[in-house]
């Protein structure tokens, strides 16, 4: 019996040494990710609950831990953000794939490098006299900006419900959610698209839900990270460092609802009851590995774009996506 025990000792020692070696290699690999740039500007299409990982990344020091100083800049829609990225005032953009088309169609060399934020997040609320889109002929419908994801989704919703977005309704760029809410209350809009928590507030203020994006698709590429191809090529370690911080933030968001709700209340200015409801709506659609929505949902996305007139045809993925960082996720992840 003692002999067997002595025979096990070398095996246990070897196993411990091997485990420590592998851990050391993993840490060494992380330490080798030295960003080419230590200060970057990240642009968001608006201030919304679905940007929770970015807020946590900054507030909890995840980006700083990876050697980055990240400055957040908020825009009034994805179409405005694209202009900032193209102009070079923003290093990394974070908005929907629909708005990215504005840059690509203009011949700009810009690509998504990470996805994984895929909630079905849009809801259309109307004045009480309008019960459904079938009653919306002649209605004034609010979106953030022309060419933005809210515009893209609204034109599709109008068309799939049997109306022509060009002639049967008037689509108005009306700014952020609070501005669109005010326009509904003042009688300047008849319908508006909202994301959470504004959809909860709209219902409480007497504007009933007439359509949910969940009725149209299972998932949606709502927020994607993108940059100019030059930045992606010249700053791969900067992007890896940023994504390492992002992955840690996604993990924390899923693990700690209380902290997430507190962060949303502070960052987005939400009442905690709205922040908590919004968190429950989108948290299961965040994926740390940057995956895209399932194939069926992506096909619906392209169908939306073609029907709405944003795209002429389904794009091949290489036209808008650099898969480097998703393909190597297992190598750089924290």
Image: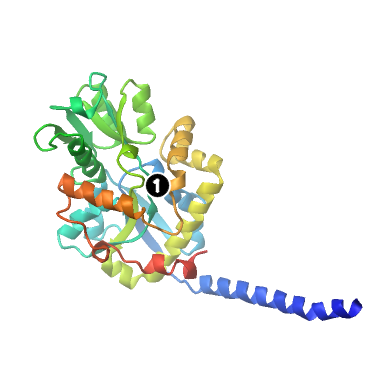
Q: Quadrant of residue 201?
A: top left
Task: Kindly identify the residue that appears in the image at 88 percent across and 80 percent down.
Answer: 3
Task: Give left or right: position of 234 versus 133.
Answer: right
Q: Position of residue 105 (x, y in %)?
A: 16, 58
Residue 8 visible in the shown view: yes
* Residue at image mark 1: 51
* Foreground of the two, 140 or 15: 15
Task: Kindly identify the residue that appears in the image at 19 percent across and 63 percent down.
Answer: 108
Q: Does residue 230 lie above or below 128 as drawn?
A: below
Task: Give left or right: position of 138 versus 265.
Answer: left
* Foreground of the two, 155 or 64: 155
Q: Position of residue 250 (x, y in %)?
A: 48, 52
* Foreground of the two, 134 or 184: 134
Extreme residue in the left direction: 167
Q: Is the N terminus in the top left, top right, bottom left or bottom right quadrant?
A: bottom right
Extreme residue in the top direction: 129
Q: Position of residue 184 (x, y in %)?
A: 25, 25
Q: Quadrant of residue 102?
A: bottom left
For mark 1, does the 10 Å Cα neighbourhood hold few (<14), some (14 to 19), or many (20 or more) residues? some
């Amino acid at each position: 019996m003692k002999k067997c025990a002595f025979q096990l000792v070398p095996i246990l020692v070897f196993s411990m040494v091997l485990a420590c070696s592998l851990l050391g290699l993993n840490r060494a690999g992380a330490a080798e990710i030295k960003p080419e740039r230590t200060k970057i500007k990240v642009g968001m299409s608006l201030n919304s609950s679905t940007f929770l990982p970015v807020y946590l990344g900054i507030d909890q020091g995840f980006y700083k831990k990876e050697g980055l100083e990240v400055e957040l800049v908020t825009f009034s829609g994805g179409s405005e953000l694209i202009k900032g990225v193209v102009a070079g005032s923003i290093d990394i953009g974070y908005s929907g794939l629909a708005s990215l088309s504005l840059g690509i169609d203009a011949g700009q060399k810009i690509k998504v490098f990470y996805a994984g934020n895929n909630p079905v997040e849009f809801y259309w609320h109307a004045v009480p006299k309008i019960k459904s889109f079938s009653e919306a002929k002649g209605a004034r419908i609010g979106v953030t900006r022309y060419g933005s994801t809210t515009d893209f989704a609204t034109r599709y919703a109008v068309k799939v419900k049997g109306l022509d977005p060009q002639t049967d309704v008037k689509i108005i760029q009306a700014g952020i959610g609070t501005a669109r809410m005010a326009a509904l209350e003042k009688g300047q809009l008849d319908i508006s698209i909202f994301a959470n928590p504004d959809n909860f507030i709209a219902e409480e203020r007497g504007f009933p839900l007439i359509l949910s994006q969940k009725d149209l698709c299972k998932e949606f590429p709502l927020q994607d990270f993108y940059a100019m191809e030059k930045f992606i090529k010249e700053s791969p370690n900067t992007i890896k460092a940023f994504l390492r911080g992002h992955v840690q933030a996604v993990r924390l968001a899923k693990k700690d609802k209380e902290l997430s709700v507190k962060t949303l209340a502070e960052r987005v200015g939400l009442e905690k009851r709205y922040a908590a409801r919004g968190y429950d709506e989108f948290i299961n659609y965040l994926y740390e590995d940057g995956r895209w929505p399932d194939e069926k949902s992506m096909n619906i996305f392209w169908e939306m774009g073609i029907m709405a007139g944003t795209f002429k045809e389904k794009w091949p993925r290489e036209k808008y996506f650099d898969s480097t960082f998703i393909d190597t996720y297992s190598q750089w992840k924290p």
